[in-house]
Amino acid sequence: MTLQDVAVVGAGLAGLVCARRLQQAGYAVTVLEKSRGLGGRMATRRIDGSPLDHGARYVQPQSSQFQALTQHWLDQQLLTPWQPHTYRLDLIGQLHPNPLTAPCYVAPAGMSALGKALATGLTVHRQQRVTAIALESDTTWTITTTRTDDGTALTHDAKTLVLALPAPQIADLLAPLPEIEEIAEMKRAIAAVTYAPCLTVMAQYTSTSQAPAPLPCPPTEPWMVEGHVETPFFWVGLDSSKRQVPGLNVVLHSSDRFAEPWLDAPNLQPAGEALLAQAGKLIAPWLAHPDRWQIHRWRYARVETPGRDRILISSTPAPLVAGGDWGGDRQLDTALESGWAAAAAIQAHFSDNPLPDFPIGLF
């Protein structure tokens, strides 16, 4: 296989931003992604033809960089403003108004459309799970992958490697590497990062007419509920209000406390049933009785203990950069900043000329 300048492992926001910036600067870049979709936790699943965002719920930019990227997506009509009724759920199941402190934006085509847009023009190998990384002759990284559809083993070679993954997955790949001091420091920093898990239920309803709806707003208007730490919920929202689709689609994100006992369970059906039952009890009775539903397990849903640095770098013997949303506590903002910084670090290794400032090289 052709030797690439850079191999980026992970097609989430950080990985795609890094790959896009480097490719537009003239580097030969390949992206390796274990899933069929792009965007990482900017994830959308289709059920009965309707898209449901089962990862990131919306875009709410904080940094100037992410505000600029959000504006670009608005200009491209990939995002649109979303103004839901917002509530906070207390311990005993009462809903209290909880006004948003900043504007929210959603993707009518689904959050995964943002990842697809960033990946335009990139060489992306999907459904390839990276199982090992190794140094060859101190100048080349060999990345071993397994196709998730048929189990075929493949290899990719690159001068530089970027690991844009959840920290525990990076730790697993780094573990067999020689104890070079820079890599050893990277291992220690990665080990300090922790995550909160989540179970996400995507539920579809024909109507709410069979049961009363104690929501303070009409159930067909945009709404979202932020959960209480002592309840089973982190967030519940009317996903179908983000786009024109028939019926009602609701996404329920569990609390980490609810998800933890189910992390290694082979069957998540009872967990989904329990979550729906609690939604019917605490939010609205009709939520307990969907026409159809699916459940997804997020082992690394939210960064609980972030790293101290946006990226980690080992320059010898061959450049290795690790980054992702674990490099801070601002989720998508952090992922964008991490991917941007990873590209700059690689450029600094090979050239004295810096890459152009944001947003040149991204859009």
Image (cartoon, helix red, strand yellow):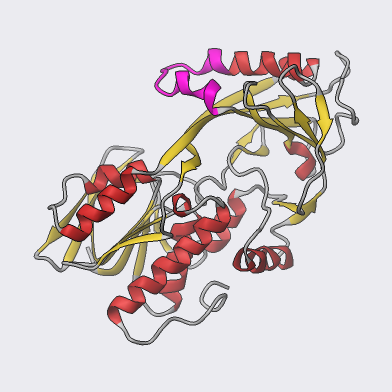
Q: Number of marks in the image?
A: 0
Measuring from the top left, give residue 88's x and y in whole percent: 76, 31
Q: Is residue 358 left or right of residue 27?
A: right
The image quarter in which residue 294 lies: top right
The quadrant of the picture occupied by the N terminus is: bottom left
Q: Kindly identify the residue that appears in the image at 48 percent across and 68 percent down.
A: 121
> Which residue occupies the foreground of this view, 227 or 292?
227
Q: Is residue 110 left or right of residue 168?
A: right
Figure check: 154 above or below 47:
below
Q: Kindly identify the residue that appears in the image at 20 percent across and 67 percent down.
A: 318
> Which residue occupies the foreground of this view, 3 or 182?
182
Measuring from the top left, give residue 141's x and y in whole percent: 20, 61
Instruction: Point out the stretch of residues depicted in magenta.
Output: 256-271
Magenta stretch containing residue 314, yes or no? no
Measuring from the top left, give residue 123's x and y in whole percent: 40, 63
Q: Kindly identify the residue that appears in the image at 62 percent across and 21 percent down.
A: 232
Main SS category, magenta section: helix
Figure check: 5 above or below 61:
below
Q: Is residue 320 left or right of residue 248?
A: left
Q: Is residue 42 visible?
A: yes
The quadrant of the picture occupied by the C terminus is: bottom right
The image quarter in which residue 54 lies: top right
Which residue in the rendered view is the most extreme toward the front? 308
